Image (tube, rainbow, N blue to C red):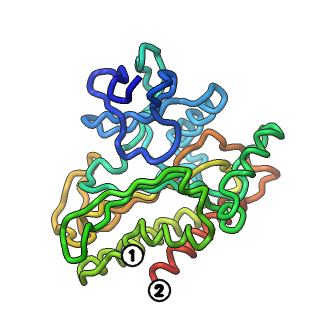
Amino acid sequence: MAKSDQELPEGFRQLKTQVAGHTFEESNAEAVGLLQDSKAGCVLKPLGKPECGERELRFYESLAEAGASGDNDLLALLRGHVPRFYGPLKLVVNRRERTFLRLEDLTRSFAKPCVMDVKMGKRTWDPESSPNKRKLEEAKYVMCKQKLGLCLPGFQVYLPKEEHTQETTILRHGKDYGKSLNVEGFKQTMALFFNASTSDSKSRRAGCELLLKEVLRQLQEILAWFQRQRLLHFYASSLLICYDYSRLADPPKSKSLINGYHQNEDDPASWVRVKMIDFAHVYPAEHGLPDENYMFGLQSLIEVVQSILHR
């Protein structure tokens, strides 16, 4: 079955900015990727296998309920670092009913969305993993995962075709590319993703600096949350880093309506977003300890972004 022949409900389409995770496959009608409901501003994520899908759904529902009665204030704070959740939805895709999570489309307002999925932590297997699953996970992304606590399942980025022109080309890489990276290659790829080496004009250099500072600000806010919390441990979870390439050179100075809220477009948070995603392997914190595994990767990522900013 060709990707264009996928049988989707009316009004829905495959998400073009998906860079990692399960995708639609030409030869397998059971393989389903992310969908987009552009009118509602939602991305629809299919629930995974039953135990994982239910765990992720419960996580989003617990965030939605947190803070309502004054309890779980830390979970309520986490909501700001996670895509908004609009509830589950059943859809028939390829003649089979499936359950999807309706999530905020983080790049809805972006003209040229750059998107990177960074998986967090040295350990990406959860407490219920079989010995075989642990072995498989430990064999993936070995160089970067063990030294940085990070791995790179995929990204897409807009790049200038030539110096001093407005024309762009789009570069996409998936997990095979990420698995080939050593530590230096990971750092170079991050610089490429942030257009740090392609910002030739003064305005684009300023835009790149603004981008990096805003990414750092959001990463440090997430780290501050993890330093406080002793509730949960996150395994095989990712950070999704998104920005609008079109804003690097010429950030407009007006207000726009984004996801129902008026935002000042001078605010870099309107075109730079760092959000936690993928919660199928979230477990109660063992012995009330901090999530050192996730924080190790997060601190490495902060150091990599800082090195790009200050080079």
Dot 1 crowding, Cα within 10 Å, few <14, some 14–19, many 20+: many
Dot 2 crowding, Cα within 10 Å, few <14, some 14–19, many 20+: few
Residue at the location (56% across, 57% down)? 178
Residue 9 lies, with reference to residue 169, above or below; the image says: above
Residue at the location (51% across, 22% down)? 30
Q: Which mark is residue 196?
A: 1
The reply to whether callout 2 and callout 1 are in contact (CB within 8 Å) is: yes
- Image coordinates of residue 11 in percent, x first then y, are 27, 26
- Residue assigned mark 2: 311
Residue at the location (16% across, 64% down)? 254
- Tell me the SS state at disc 2: loop
Quarter occupied by residue 194:
bottom left
* Foreground residue among 269 and 120: 120
Left or right: residue 218 compared with residue 41: right
Q: Amino acid at mark 2?
A: Arg
Would residue 307 be visible to someone looking at this image? Answer: yes
Quarter occupied by residue 136:
top right
> Which residue in the rendered view is the most extreme toward the top?
95
Q: Label 2 vs label 1: CA separation? A: 10 Å
Of mark 2 and mark 1, the one earlier in the sequence is 1
